[in-house]
Image (cartoon, rainbow, N blue to C red):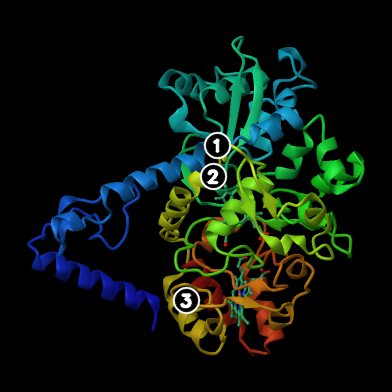
Amino acid sequence: MSHRWESRLIATLAVLVAGATGCSGSNGKSYGLEMPSDGGLDACSATAGMPDEGNLPSKETRASLEAGQKTFRFDTFGDEAFWGDTLKLHRAIEGEAHGGVGPGVSPKTALSVGLKVDVDAIPGEVARDLKAGLVNLEDPATTLALLQLNAVVGVTGFFNDDKTLKSVGIQCALCHSTVDDSFAPGIGKRLDGWANRDLNVGAIIGLAPDLSAVATLLQIDEATVRKVLASWGPGKFDAELILDGKGMRPDGKPAATLIPPAFGLVGVNLHTWTGWGSVPHWNAFVANLEMMGKGTFFDPRLDDASKFPVAARARLGHVQNDPDLVTPKLPDLHLYQLSLASPPPPAGSFDAEAAERGDELFEGKARCARCHVEPLFTEPGWNLHSAADIGIDDFQAMRSPDGKYRTAPLRGLHTHMKGGFFHDGRFATLLDVVNHYDQFFMLGLTDAEKNDVVEYLKSL
Ligand code: HEC
Ligand code: HEC
């Protein structure tokens, strides 16, 4: 069944339910079937067919969603002990003129490595000055002012009394949020869950004056660490580096993977490109092992020294901190992430008629829906495949416990057209993806049919 038809059916049912309970005059909000983006539900929809105390979502659920959003956007889990105190990244941000080292990071530099600025955190008069070109975007002091306003998405500055930087920490939003550019390129309203495909994580970490802690963990020299970081490029990160120490692929290409979206994950079983586990597993993993937050993490699969020599040596599958700054936040964070729906494609961004034909092909001749099952666009159940199933090499798959690739859920592809497709961006365009499948599965698609499938993918 086409998912469009299905959503029309759901919408019709919703209107019928609302009508039956006297909730006619639609105010454009949903009827309790989906969360409006502001997290609020009108009184009518909340009570449709429900006893009063059955309000959906309950007060507790709303509070939990709000707490989860705060965690996603602002919580460092104490990771400033690593990014600031150990790597001294804050000193590189300040620059010599403000008590740090080097030239410092001006807003211009920060934007050029893909950092984003939250316009809602900027007071009106500063925004006016910015628009008028009265703010010096070449001066690291401006970056410090933005950090003080908590306006840099995914980065928190910790300040001394004399307004110099004491430390700096990072959040989930660093990689999994961007902005809508409504104020200026790189400056706008937050878009939580969107992959930041401009963000050059390797270049940012590479700014740190002291990478000896990473070199020691990986048992390589600091120059090699810097070379590996420089190889990643925009929109990529290598979550497995600190587990297996593989800086490069055997063919000499970068080993980093693309940052995936963190929206549209509800109903999806296994997560990450290689299916490491559930969302709560990965959230705990990232907060403790990648961000270096101070929590608890348990995963005995990391004791496999042949696959994960670094993790086994450092006992990364057995992390314990007291106090635990991560675990108490995981339930709310999980709920918030599941609440992030895939944004619909912008009007006019695809050819609707071609997409309708592409929908038929996706389920029919192109046989995509064998794996990308609507409306999840991944398999309900065990959603992993061997590299041979999809006709690519197994380098990245073999860096995970199951040695497989996860069927990528395809909704919201239009939000990450930068950086390419598949885990490492090996296919520059959606047409390249379709051409690959056409060849590998010997589908015999015509050029027009390939185009229809691409338009369908753009419509998801
Ligand atoms: C430094 C960048 C970075 C940060 C910070 C980060 N992530 Fe990720 N995230 C990634 C990358 C890269 C992947 C893909 C990893 C892989 O497949 O090996 C990923 C994968 C995920 C996935 C799986 C998505 C899917 O399609 O299944 C989730 C969920 C997720 N991250 C949530 C979080 C949360 C929650 C936080 C904060 C606790 C966080 N991430 C912090 C880069 C980041
Ligand atoms: C045998 C199962 C299978 C079939 C059949 C299949 N896919 Fe996939 N698809 C996958 C897997 C697994 C991945 C993840 C690849 C990776 O991580 O590199 C994927 C990835 C993708 C991506 C990249 C998503 C992203 O975020 O980069 C697109 C687009 C896609 N598939 C479209 C299609 C289309 C179109 C078809 C039909 C022509 C199709 N797939 C057929 C399993 C399948």
Q: Secondary structure at mark 3?
A: helix
Judge from the rendering whether residue 360 lies leftward or rightward of residue 5; answer left or right: right
Q: Earlier in the sequence, mark 1 or mark 2?
A: 1
Q: Earlier in the sequence, mark 3 or mark 2?
A: 2
- Labels 1 & 2 near each other (Cβ < 8 A): yes
Residue 17 visible, this orientation: yes
Residue on which disc 2 sits: 178
27 or 67, nearer to the observer: 67
Q: Which mark is residue 354?
A: 3
Looking at numbered disc 3 in the image, what kind of residue is underneath it?
Ala
Q: Secondary structure at mark 1?
A: loop
Q: Which mark is residue 221?
A: none
Residue on which disc 1 sits: 153
Q: Residue at x 60, y 73 (%)?
A: 407
Marks 1 and 2 sit apart, C-alpha to C-alpha, by: 8 Å
426 or 370, nearer to the observer: 370
Of circles 3 and 1, which is in front?
A: 1
Q: Residue at x 25, y 58 (%)?
A: 30
> Image height check: is 395 above or below 6?
above
Residue positioned most to the top: 162
> Image height check: is 339 above or below 396?
above
* Residue 257 in which image quadrant: bottom right
Marks 3 and 1 sit apart, C-alpha to C-alpha, by: 37 Å
Q: Residue at x 66, y 81 (%)?
A: 437
Residue 180 visible, this orientation: no
